[in-house]
Image (spheres, rainbow, N blue to C red):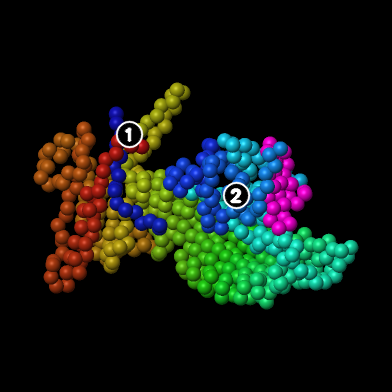
């Protein structure tokens, strides 16, 4: 025998790696089938498309070297590529997994190789060797090589000897102790040196030689330790710890107004670990918790623009994910339970104004699965199943299961019921009573509303609409008094509308109008009832 469900279709109150092709050989090539490579926003084109192997991108060396400002030398006998920029020198050799940077050996993820007569080299290694930042966007398939404060420093430190002038202490003909370094005649650095390198406390100036852009500690020509970064106008951008030229450890980022934008831990120039994010214009906290690689991850809290807590719980990849609680502007919890990808999903409890609550399943932000609605006094208002946010009303007989041991278990599915309260009906929403008696779903009008302390109407009530389940024989006896909703082989679903018991004039007119408002709502709800075949739809 088929089993059927009746579903009340009315809106519920809701609160809401395969091998990759690389850069184009010409501008007309298909963007969907190619990786694009950019240097500081400018597109780089190649004669031969780049390729990716074991997660490493290999590109034709000449276009990338030239874009990085490296002068190129090719030794065909030893199959060696050399790129120079001032006194900086990088050397790679075909099929050799070891490169040299200023004479120091560096291991490569993949050795350079010849492809269709062109020499291919590891893109990330070459970019990072010049202290540029190399990033990959998986969605757009774009590789971006961006200049950094470190790459600009390296350009100066390794510029031609004729472009640099030093004033200060020397030891064994090397810069040692306090000194000043001028680039193209303009003061660029003053502070401590050791073995010709920036080492200790020092300052770096902009191209005018007047404005400090960094003040703090150095190690091996890089910002390391405590330091402050400024823009060219002297506005503080960052204050905190550095390591190997990048933000690493505890620090603060500042806005143009001088307010703290972020206060917390960094790793590889990104928010990472415990931190607090502030509104750029008001300075109020908007997020407090943990980060990973610049994205909210782990436990955290979200605050609105007024500084009120709106969410506390788990995050994953920048989204609410896991256990969490959401709050109203006045600090009351309106939901606690499971989240998935920023929406309520799983098991949770939703709290409503006045003390009522829903406890049960959610999916994609909607009620889904089994749930219960409670009044403020703890009494169950309705209880049953939900599908995609809609109440499900069962029409299934009592089922008896007999095991192989002869033990029988009786399960009564007929008691599952639920209903909708429309909070968009001003002044009359507390006058609607919906009951489920045997096979009837009845919408009633309470002229004096509900006493939530007792769970009972304050005065006698009147029927608005009655939804019933009839046999074919029952329906055929008097079909004119019913409006048919749906039917199965043996069953007919119908509803009837009651007349308005109040007069349309005088003192009874407000009740007359309220009755008609709820009558319209109840009839529309009844019209949305549909039949679902349990064997096919669930």
Query: Based on the displayed image, in which of its 4 quarters is residue 448 positioned?
Result: bottom left
Q: Residues within 10 Å of mark 1 (few under 14, many from 20)?
A: few
Instruction: Identify the residue shown where x is 33% and y is 45%.
Output: 392
Q: Using the rendered image of the protein, determine whether residue 465 is visible from the camera's viewpoint.
A: yes
| Dot placed on the residue nearer the N-terminal end, 2 or 1 | 2
Residue 294 at what x, y percent from top left? 59, 57
Instruction: Identify the residue shown where x is 65% and y is 71%.
Output: 207
Residue 434 covered by magenta stretch: no
Q: Is residue 466 left or right of residue 407?
A: left
- The residue range painted magenta reads 78-104
Q: Which mark is residue 536?
A: 1
Instruction: Identify the residue shown where x is 43% and y is 46%.
Output: 28
Quadrant including the N terminus = top left
**Front one among 254 and 108:** 108
**Front one among 267 and 157:** 157
Q: Is residue 345 left or right of residue 414?
A: right
Residue at the right extreme of this rendering: 172
Q: Secondary structure at mark 1?
A: helix
Q: Secondary structure at mark 2?
A: helix
In the rendered image, the vertical position of residue 98 relative to residue 41, given as above or below: above
Query: Based on the displayed image, in which of its 4 quarters is residue 313 positioned?
Result: bottom right
Q: Which residue is mark 2?
A: 64
């Amino acid at each position: 025998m088929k089993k059927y469900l009746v579903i009340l279709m009315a809106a519920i109150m809701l609160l809401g790696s395969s091998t990759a092709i690389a850069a184009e050989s010409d501008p007309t090539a298909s963007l969907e089938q190619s990786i694009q490579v950019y240097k500081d926003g400018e597109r780089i084109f190649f004669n031969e498309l780049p390729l990716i192997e074991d997660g490493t991108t290999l590109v034709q060396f000449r276009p990338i070297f030239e874009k990085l400002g490296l002068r190129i030398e090719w030794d065909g006998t030893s199959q060696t590529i050399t790129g120079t920029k001032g006194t900086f020198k990088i050397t790679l050799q075909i099929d050799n997994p070891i490169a040299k940077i200023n004479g120091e050996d560096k291991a490569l993820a993949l050795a350079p190789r010849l492809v269709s007569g062109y020499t291919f080299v590891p893109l990330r290694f070459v970019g990072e060797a010049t202290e540029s930042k190399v990033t990959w966007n998986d969605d757009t398939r774009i590789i971006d090589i961006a200049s950094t404060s470190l790459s600009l420093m390296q350009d100066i430190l390794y510029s031609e000897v004729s472009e640099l002038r030093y004033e200060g202490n020397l030891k064994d003909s090397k810069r040692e102790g306090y000194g000043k370094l001028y680039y193209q005649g303009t003061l660029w650095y003053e502070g401590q040196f050791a073995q010709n390198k920036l080492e200790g406390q020092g300052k770096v100036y902009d191209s005018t030689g007047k404005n400090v852009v960094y003040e703090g500690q150095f190690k091996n020509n890089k910002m390391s330790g405590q330091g402050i970064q400024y823009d060219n106008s002297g506005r503080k951008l960052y204050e905190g710890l550095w390591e190997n030229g990048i933000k690493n450890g505890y620090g603060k980022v500042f806005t143009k107004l001088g307010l703290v934008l972020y206060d917390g831990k960094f790793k590889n120039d990104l928010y990472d670990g415990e931190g607090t994010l502030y509104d750029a214009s008001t300075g109020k906290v908007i997020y407090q918790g943990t980060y990973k690689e610049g994205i909210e991850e782990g436990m955290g809290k979200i605050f609105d623009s007024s500084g009120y807590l709106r969410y506390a719980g788990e995050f994953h990849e920048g989204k609410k994910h896991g256990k969490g609680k959401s709050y109203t502007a006045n600090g009351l919890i309106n939901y606690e339970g499971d989240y998935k990808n920023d929406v309520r999903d799983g098991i949770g409890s939703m709290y409503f104004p006045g003390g009522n609550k829903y406890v049960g399943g959610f999916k994609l932000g909607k009620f889904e699965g089994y749930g219960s609605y409670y009044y403020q006094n703890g009494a169950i208002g309705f209880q049953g199943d939900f599908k995609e946010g809609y109440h499900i009303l069962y029409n299934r007989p009592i089922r008896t299961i007999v095991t192989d041991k002869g033990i029988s278990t009786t399960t009564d599915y007929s008691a599952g019921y639920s209903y909708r309260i429309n909070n968009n009906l001003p002044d009359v929403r507390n006058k609607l009573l919906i009951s489920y008696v045997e096979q009837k779903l009845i919408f009633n009008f309470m002229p004096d509303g509900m006493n939530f302390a007792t769970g009972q109407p304050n005065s006698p009530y009147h029927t608005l609409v009655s939804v019933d389940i009839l046999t074919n024989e029952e329906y055929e006896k008097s079909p004119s008094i019913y409006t048919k909703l749906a039917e199965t082989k043996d069953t007919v679903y119908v509803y009837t509308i009651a007349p308005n018991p109040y007069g349309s004039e005088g003192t009874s007119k407000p009740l007359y109008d309220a009755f008609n408002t709820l009558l319209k709502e109840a009839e529309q709800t009844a019209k949305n009832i549909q039949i679902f075949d349990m064997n096919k739809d669930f």
